Amino acid sequence: MINPRLNVLSLLLLTFPVAAAAQSGAPPQATAVWGFGALGVGATGTDSTFYAAGIGVGLQRGRVVALGRIAGVGPGKASHYEDAGFLVGLGGGRGRFHALAAAGFGLARNADKATSLAIPVEVQATWRTLPWLGLGVRGFLSINNLSTFGGLSLVAEMGRLRP
């Protein structure tokens, strides 16, 4: 049976960014589309600090941001945790600087191939040096029943960053 709290949370996560970005009578806005890769440090709820890596894609129209991402932490096969998720949130910035915050739903997996539903959370701050290249920092968290994990990493973005 699905937890009623998760239903309310999912409704808020999906509705709030859309409602916050709605603009009546505003001209249509172009879409930014990018891919990203990240490498840094991370930790699980039960182990010490390890490497953290992530890849994903992002799309932004107006202030609404959608991310698909895979994130993982762990030194090797014995204590590796990862998740794959779809996140929705808000993004914006001035000039070449861009920030975003998003949360969503995903699936987490540990080294033993056990899986669990997850709530992935991500924040990014980037300096978009060129219209197609950005560099910055990324913080991520995966809340799940196996072992909550998160990290901080350097991120590189490539794509149509400034519509």
Image (spheres, helix red, strand yellow):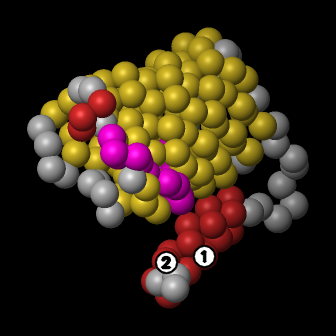
Answer with the quarter of the image where residue 40 lies: top left
Residue 102 on the magenta segment: yes
Residue drawn 60% across and 42% down?
68
Is the stretch drawn in magenta largely helix, strand or loop? strand
The residue identified by callout 1 is 11
Mark earlier in primary sequence (2, 1):
2
**Compared with residue 89, is residue 80 higher up or lower down, i.e. above or below?**
above
Residue drawn 40% across and 46% down?
113
SS for dot 1: helix
User: How many numbered circles are shown?
Assistant: 2
Q: Is residue 3 left or right of residue 151?
A: right
- Nearest the eye: 110 or 87: 110
- Magenta stretch? 100-113
Task: Pinpoint residue 107: horizontal percent, then vertical percent.
Answer: 49, 54
**Compared with residue 27, is residue 136 higher up or lower down, i.e. above or below?**
above
Task: Pinpoint residue 6: horizontal percent, then vertical percent.
Answer: 49, 77
Q: Amino acid at mark 2?
A: Leu
Q: Amino acid at mark 1?
A: Leu
The residue identified by callout 2 is 6
Residue 144 on the magenta segment: no
Q: Is residue 46 left or right of residue 102?
A: left
